[in-house]
Image (tube, rainbow, N blue to C red):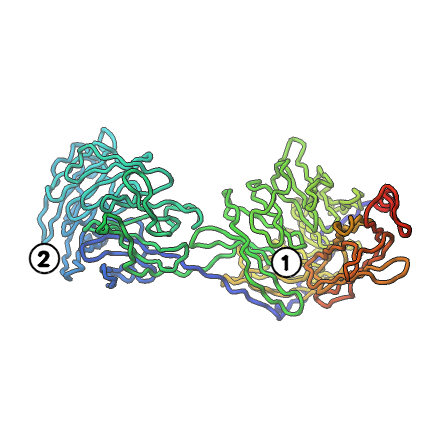
Amino acid sequence: MSVMLAVGLVPLTAGAAQGESGSGEVVIPSTTVLRPQTNLLSAGPSGFLRYEYARGHLWTTYAGADTVVDASATEVRTVPDFGAGSDVVAHYDDTGRTVRLRDMSTGRSRTVVLPAAHTYVSTLGWTVVTTTGSSGGADVTWQLLDTRDDNSFTQRAVEGVPDGVTVTFEADSPLGDAHGQVVQYRTAAGGRTGWLDVDQGRLIPLSYRVDTNPGRIVLTPTHLLWWQDGVVAIHSRLDLTATPRLVPLTGEAQLLGMVGGTLVVSRYDSSLGRFSYLMPVWRIDAVAFDGATVKTLLARSAHRGLPTPNGGLLVPGGPGPGWDGWGVSLVEAAADGQVTARRIADAYPQRMPVVVDDLTLTQGRLNTQEYDPSIEKRHVYTRDIGVTGSPTVGARVARGAAHEGCAAPVCTRLHDTGDGRTVVSGVHGSLQPHLLEPTQSLPGSRIDSSRTYQSVAAVSGRFAALTGPSTGTGAETRVIDLGTRRAVFTATAGVEAMWGTTLWVRDGNDAVTPIDITTGQRGAQVWFGRGCLLEDFQAVGRWLLWTCVGSVEGQGVYDTVKKTNLTLVSGSGWSRAKLGDGFVVSEANGQLKVTDVRSGSPVSHTAGDFGSVRPWDVDPYTGLIAHVGADGDIHLVPSGIPVSPLVQIDATVATSVDVKGGTGQWSPKWWLSKPAASWTLVIRNKATGSTVRTLSGGLARGLVATAWNGKDGSGRLMPNGAYTWTLTAQPADGQGAALTRSGTLLLARQCLSQSRWRSSSVTCSSYRSGLR
């Protein structure tokens, strides 16, 4: 038997009731973190230039005193404009083609107007470096403008520049000082590296090609060092063309500098965050010339350092994995030849909001994926939301780092089962489905290691429907019992939804059919009409939400009890929607709209402002809506629609048990349609009616699970025989009657081949009969 749904049967009209969002909204403020933005730009004998968030460019003495140089300056990653290796700070104004020079130790200043056809390169002390060349870029040469206090200058053309230089590449780190700088250029013979000697006004071509990226090459007052293929080459600046000393440096390291006879390097520490050259996820180590690590100087840092003219090294960082004590430290040589690090200036980290990229709300448990910009990683968190009275918010519990093994912004998908557990999967099969227990941390445990899955089709209670890769005949979906990790049902048609033990599978493009997972029995097909291409389908209790595209488009709700259909949108004007218990939440005109469908006529009201890029979810078990507002906060808004009475949607209750002398136990479980405030399980002797044990518990979010070892309250083992049990669960929301379930249990203290009991005996055969 099939039931046809005619799209457009009962459309939502302009006359539907519209109202304001209900009261009782609770706001979870967004979390903030600190992210250091310190960027070291240049260093001289008396101090150094740095960038700090919201403070701009600061000149800081080695005693820690700050002078604002440019409060409006923004963060930069390249530094040739600011001077190198002296107390002179430079600022190049491209519009006026002027270079302003200021000696931060004396206050003297000069302003130089660049000659026509000169291109600014850098400032070394009081000398401005430019390039000149033909309009086509051929025969480029360097020019040195030696400035005077009256803002005039003398010009020197750098000697020794080979013919045919076409392009120059300047380093993006301060590889220079008042005496010269490293430059790169190209000739017909290819790319080259050279030393631009300001004192001699000469270019010294080097016989080696050096990568000038930070971490690959550094300059100290006495040496030039570069690192490649696990080896550091150390050149004396007295003769940069001589054979260098080679020192091993292996692993994921970046070369920061050399202090005395010790290398200073940064090593990536995965415990600090995702790998990034721009993030503070590096540990600073002192390394001897034999390659052995001497000691850790800073537990956390960005990977760049800045040499000082007196042989020290400035490094931003802190002594621990957090931001306490973060600042600028000076690495310097001690009297005994060792190196030490001491903080000489405080940093000013930026306070940034943690962004909620995704959320799920099920049985009053809020799971979020939150992006932490300080470490550029996403973590999963859980908060328990109160389900009695007005919503209350529990502690934010960390569940671990989210999977990041795909190209999508959010790689991890969370699928709540409704009993406190979560199935975790990756986008397009990038992470195989794992089960996360209620208090477990990621990654959880693999659900089925025998197969590869592309997606999670649906989850509910003890079941997860996992879909494998598509083949020539389609994709197979296996329903796995999460307790036993065994497949209990296999579907070749697409699985659309699951609620309790009912699996909804697609029949063609325009219909679905319910299947009882435990028996395999198929129910009546629900048909959505000719021309419907099913785009989305959801199931909550008696309600089905459908969305059709194709030649006939629309969106509506089908009531499986009354066998009636309500079309909410006719045509292509539908939007993303989620199904609750008797209501639908959809996006409409920048807001979330709640539509009550219980009466057969739609009645709507708004539930809060909404942005299309912000996540939201509906808890079908409690009627609560969670959405991220424009302010970045999480808003919890009651739908205003009371959920249905408390019912059982699944259960695993054995009718016989061998308690093995009290070491075994009977472990019944009941899955519920909404949270229960409390529950009581009364076990009675069937023959006498006397109560032998009462088990009880408090709040149950979708699952009542308990165990009985066959003993009474005083610890006495009960005799073999038949017992009855009665479960009573009170709804947490106070709506509807209590749930009551009852049954019979055959108890054996020990399954025996021959009965040794004179009364109420249970043999193995009778025990197995009870199991059947």
- For label 2, the residue is 149
Find the residue positioned furthest to the bottom.
Answer: 23
Q: CA distance from mark 1 to mark 2?
A: 71 Å
Q: Residues within 10 Å of mark 2 (few under 14, many from 20)?
A: few
Location of residue 639 in the rendering, given as x and y in whole percent from the top left corner: 65, 64
Numbered disc total:
2
Seen in the picture, residue 515 relative to 587 is either above or below; the reply is above
Seen in the picture, residue 446 relative to 685 is either above or below; the reply is above
Q: In which quadrant of the rendered view does residue 532 lie?
A: top right
Q: In the visual, does 540 lie left or right of 171?
A: right
Q: Residues within 10 Å of mark 1 (few under 14, many from 20)?
A: many
* Residue at x-position 68% and y-position 63%: 699
Location of residue 156 in the rendering, given as x and y in whole percent from the top left corner: 10, 44
Q: Which mark is residue 473?
A: none
Q: Earlier in the sequence, mark 1 or mark 2?
A: 2
Identify the amino acid type marked 2. Answer: Asp
Seen in the picture, residue 307 relative to 629 is either above or below; the reply is above
Image quarter hosting the N terminus = top right
Location of residue 142 in the rendering, given as x and y in whole percent from the top left corner: 16, 41
Q: In which quadrant of the rendered view does residue 474 lie?
A: top right
**Of 224 and 708, which appears nearest the observer?**
708
- For label 1, the residue is 618
Q: Assign a secondary structure to mark 2.
A: loop
Identify the amino acid type marked 1. Answer: Val
Seen in the picture, residue 400 relative to 389 is either above or below; the reply is above
Location of residue 656 in the rendering, given as x and y in whole percent from the top left corner: 82, 49
